[in-house]
Amino acid sequence: MDNILLRPLPLTTASVGMLRLAGGPVAFAELELLRRGHPPQLVPNDAVDMGRLAPFCALRDPILGIAMDRPLLMAVLNVTPDSFSDGGTDADMDEAVARGMALAAAGADFIDIGGESTRPGADQVSIGQEQDRVLPVIEGLRAAGLRVPISIDTRNAATARAAMAAGAGLFNDISALTHDPDSLATAAELRMPVCLMHAQGDPKTMQADPRYDDVVLDVHDWLGARVEACVAAGIPKSRIIVDPGIGFGKTLAHNLRLISHLSVFHGLGCAVMLGASRKRFIGTLTGVEHAAERGAGSVGAAIAGAAQGAQILRVHDVAMTRQALLIWSAASGMWEPET
């Protein structure tokens, strides 16, 4: 089965014979066997060696002290003038700090701060300009008493290093530490947790004509290679998050297939993040042109990710998503509210 990927088929109600997906609230009793050039094959859990299933079952270690036993929210705080969703909204430092504090109060588990737009067609900015945008906000949030972990959304090792000195703790890189040749060594040296995202091409060209032999298998294998590179560099899987990169060099069909097959990525033995909030595919499906008006569709995507066992959901609308997750988990019988 070395060339076969396992795809657990998640269920929200556990019973006899089921296993917990990544030790979280979602369970599975069956799996699909996925192999290039062959149709999927459905098998029960007991048809697969438990050693092969171990990565799918183990509870992930905490990231920056945050337990991975429920869907967590990483709030987006862009301090760029040209972000696809909220460009310019939080570009002023004081406004960005106030926004970050509000996101934490709304229930964000992480605050993800980025100073370079990675929307389709975006131009690259200098490292100095990026740092001028993000560092005062990180420092301002810490000075304001923010206790929530901060993630720095950057492709640049120097920015990650400076951000950590300012109070950030997680290195979230859309290039999976490939853009900057110093990134792997920097993350290992600083013992920073990292988020490795898949992208086909760079932001300027990634949506020109994305193609895959099999998007699920191709993205899985590429991320698997990046996880192996991190481990070889001294970054253990306990400090790695993987993200299939919705909207980064993917068509509508690619995005939907990745979300529906998200459970495959638990086999890499790392925490899984889904960042689908306000993306273009939601607008394509719903006819909603303006990204800021795609809140309801974004919540739908977040629930789909949670149902696939994703440990982290990267979102813009924290309060709305938190409320939806609460109802979904209670209605699914994952917990019983006090009466």
Image: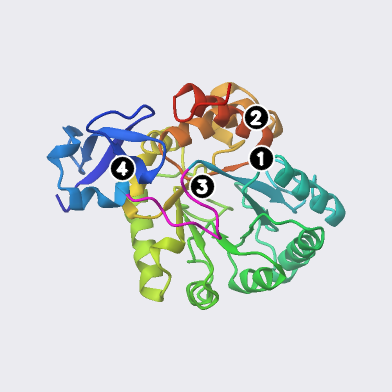
Q: Quadrant of the C terminus?
A: top right
Crowd band around label 2 with a 10 angstrom C-alpha radius: few (<14), some (14–19), many (20+): some
Q: Which residues are magenta?
A: 58-69
Residue of label 3: 248
What's the amino acid at mark 1?
His
Apparent side of residue 265 relative to residue 117 in the rendered image (left or right): left
Residue of label 1: 316
- Mark 2–mark 1 distance (CA, rounded to whole Å): 8 Å
Image height of 324 relative to 317, above or below:
above
What's the amino acid at mark 2?
Gly
What's the amino acid at mark 3?
Phe
Q: Is residue 215 visible?
A: no
- Mark 4–mark 3 distance (CA, rounded to whole Å): 16 Å
Q: Main secondary structure of the magenta part?
A: loop
- Mark 1–mark 3 distance (CA, rounded to whole Å): 17 Å
Q: Which mark is residue 214?
A: 4
Image height of 257 relative to 169, above or below:
above
Crowd band around label 3 with a 10 angstrom C-alpha radius: few (<14), some (14–19), many (20+): many
